[in-house]
């Protein structure tokens, strides 16, 4: 019988890996919807179990499982690391906002100081202009 769905659609059930057949027969939804395919998988597994050495050789793994098969501790560590990075990003953002705010206040203070200096300069110029006018009108240049 050939698979009529999924990744191996159109391929004979007898050519499937044993681990895939185990997964196939353990999936409740597939057992409910695809019983003839599950039945064929069970027949293939029965034949394979007749030759135990072949099935042991197929199921024995010599490589570690993929990274996504992590233990709960590793998952918790990854989440804690993500949380730590998020906290660092938030604190850096808050620090940058504080720096920007201080820069704006500093710019504002410089602008206010510059305005004050400009006003004082204008005041000095007006005073000098008045003194010059008085000296010219009343000829009191030697008193000033």
Image (cartoon, helix red, strand yellow):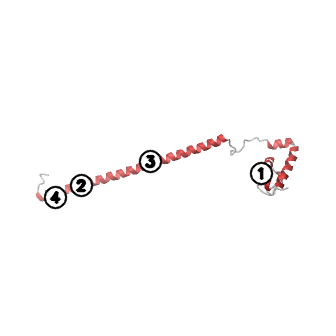
Q: CA distance from mark 3 to mark 2?
A: 37 Å
Sequence-first tag of 3 and 2: 3
Q: CA distance from mark 1 to mark 4?
A: 106 Å
Q: CA distance from mark 4 to mark 2?
A: 15 Å
Q: Residues within 10 Å of mark 3 (few under 14, many from 20)?
A: few
Question: Which mark's residue is nearer the viewer, 1 or 4?
Answer: 1
Q: Is residue 31 left or right of residue 115?
A: right
- Circles 1 and 3, Cβ within 8 Å, touching? The answer is no
Sequence-first tag of 1 and 3: 1
The tag on residue 123 is: 2
Circle 3: element type: helix
Question: Which mark's residue is nearer the viewer, 1 or 2?
Answer: 1
Question: Which mark's residue is nearer the viewer, 3 or 4?
Answer: 3
Q: Residue at x 59, y 42 (%)?
A: 80
Find disc 3 in the rendering and name its residue: 98
Q: Position of residue 121 (x, y in %)?
A: 26, 54
Sequence-first tag of 1 and 4: 1
Sequence-first tag of 3 and 4: 3
């Amino acid at each position: 019988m050939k698979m009529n769905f999924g990744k191996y659609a159109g391929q004979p059930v007898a050519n499937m890996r044993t681990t895939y057949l185990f997964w196939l027969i353990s999936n409740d939804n597939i057992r409910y919807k695809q019983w003839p395919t599950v039945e064929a998988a069970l027949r293939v597994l029965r034949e394979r179990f007749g030759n135990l050495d072949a099935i042991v050789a197929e199921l024995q793994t010599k490589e570690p499982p993929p990274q996504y098969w992590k233990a709960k501790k590793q998952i918790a560590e990854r989440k804690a690391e993500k949380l730590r990075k998020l906290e660092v990003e938030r604190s850096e953002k808050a620090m940058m906002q504080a720096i920007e705010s201080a820069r704006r206040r500093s710019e504002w203070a410089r602008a206010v100081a510059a305005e004050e200096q400009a006003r004082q300069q204008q005041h000095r110029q007006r005073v000098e202009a008045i003194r010059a006018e008085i000296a010219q009108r009343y000829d009191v240049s030697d008193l000033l």
